[in-house]
Each structure stands twice: as C-alpha cells, then as structure tokens.
C-alpha cells in the first residue's frame, strides 16, 4: 500500500512540475512581430459624440492608437477600451 501511495505522489509531483515548467516557458517566448505598416490591426475602443450622444465601437484600425473619428463636425471622446 505504501508503494502505491509513493508512486502516486511521484507521478503527481512530476505532473505539477511539468505543468509549471510549461507555464513559465510560455512567458519566456518572444512577442510576435507587429504587422507591417498599413495592415489593419484588431482594436476594441469605444468613442462617444459629446454633442448628440452617438457611440461608436472601433474594432479594426491601421494602428494600435487610432485618432478619434469625427461626428457632428467635432472629434469624438474616448469612452474606454472595451474589455471582452
């Protein structure tokens, strides 16, 4: 009975160690290269028109920090990045 518990403990320790090493290995991988200039990138940003209250959700843009769209002849106000 003791041998069975020892084998289970060694196996569980090995699995925990392997999972931890893979998780830490994922942090050490380099970030992906950004897309070339002019190619559209995914963004999630909400803008609101201060004059009429219209809201716009921007999902793709040519860069990660796009300029705000214009509505009612004025720039829209950044509400917040959208969290999904």
Image (cartoon, rainbow, N blue to C red):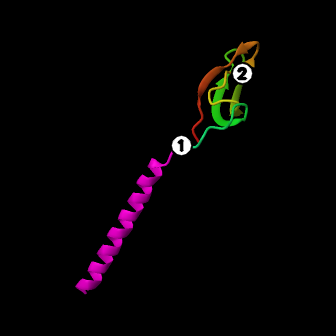
Question: Disc 1 on helix, strand or loop?
Answer: loop
Name the quarter where the N terminus is drawn.
Answer: bottom left
Name the quarter where the C terminus is drawn.
Answer: top right
How many C-alpha atoms fall within 10 Å of the one at disc 2: few (<14), some, or many (≥20)? some
The residue beneath circle 2 is 69
Q: Nearer the viewer, residue 44 or 66?
A: 66
Measured from the top left, where is residue 11 in percent x and y? 35, 74
In primary-sequence order, the first of circles 2 and 1 is 1
Q: Magenta segment range?
A: 1-30
Residue 56 found in image quarter: top right
Residue 31, numbered circle: 1
View extreme (bottom): residue: 1
View extreme (left): residue: 2
Residue 49 found in image quarter: top right
Q: Is residue 8 above or below residue 64?
A: below
Determine the residue positioned at 40% across, 64% down. 18
Question: Disc 2 on helix, strand or loop?
Answer: loop
How many C-alpha atoms fall within 10 Å of the one at disc 1: few (<14), some, or many (≥20)? few
Type of secondary structure dominating the magenta stretch: helix
Determine the residue positioned at 62% across, 30% down. 64
Q: Is residue 14 above or below residue 67?
A: below
Q: Is residue 35 above or below residue 21?
A: above
Residue 49, numbered circle: none
């Amino acid at each position: 009975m003791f041998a069975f518990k020892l084998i289970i403990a060694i196996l569980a320790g090995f699995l925990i160690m392997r999972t931890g090493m893979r998780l830490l290995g994922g942090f050490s991988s380099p970030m992906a290269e950004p897309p070339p200039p002019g190619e559209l990138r995914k963004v999630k940003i909400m803008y609101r028109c201060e004059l009429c209250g219209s809201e716009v959700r921007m999902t793709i843009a040519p860069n990660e920090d796009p300029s705000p769209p214009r509505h009612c002849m004025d720039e829209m106000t950044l509400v917040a990045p959208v969290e999904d």
